[in-house]
Amino acid sequence: MLKQRVLTALVLIPLVVAGVLLLPSVWVGLALALVILLGSGEWARLSGIEACIAQIPYILVSALGISGAAFLLQDPA
């Protein structure tokens, strides 16, 4: 199990670093938002919400929070 995690890290770390350094901020933010939304779906399953239809409101609230944070933190210029 540890071997698989190390191999995954060896693949993902260069991809993340390259993405942060080479992509525009908007694309990095969208990629991060996608990871957060995927994680919120996983968190819903860990919380005991098994049905996919029941996970949708949980994920939508997470998306609303991300959208609100992006709106509040946008550049005024």
Image (spheres, helix red, strand yellow):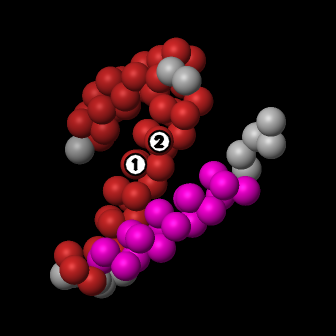
For the N terminus, the image quarter is: top left
**Residue at 55% in and 59% down:** 66
Crowd class of label 2 (few under 14; some 14 to 19; many from 20; radius 10 Å): few
**Bounds of the magenta segment:** 55-72
Looking at the picture, does residue 72 appear above or below residue 19? below
Residue that label 1 marks? 34
The answer, for residue 17, to whether it is visible in the render is no
Residue farthest along the front direction in this orientation: 77
Spatial CA span between label 2 and label 1: 6 Å
- Front residue of this view, candidates 6 and 31: 31
- Front residue of this view, candidates 46 and 71: 71
Q: Position of residue 74 (x, y in %)?
A: 71, 46
Residue that label 2 marks? 30
Q: Inspect the image, locate mark 1, and give the three-letter code of the amino acid beneath it.
A: Leu
Q: Inspect the image, locate mark 2, and give the three-letter code of the amino acid beneath it.
A: Leu
Evaluate if marks 2 and 1 touch, with contact meaning CB atoms under 8 Å apart: yes
Looking at the picture, does residue 69 appear above or below residue 7? below
Quadrant position of residue 54: bottom left
Quadrant position of residue 25: top right
Looking at the picture, does residue 46 appear above or below residue 27? below
The answer, for residue 35, to whether it is visible in the render is yes
- Front residue of this view, candidates 2 and 10: 10
For the C terminus, the image quarter is: top right
Q: Position of residue 19 (x, y in %)?
A: 47, 23
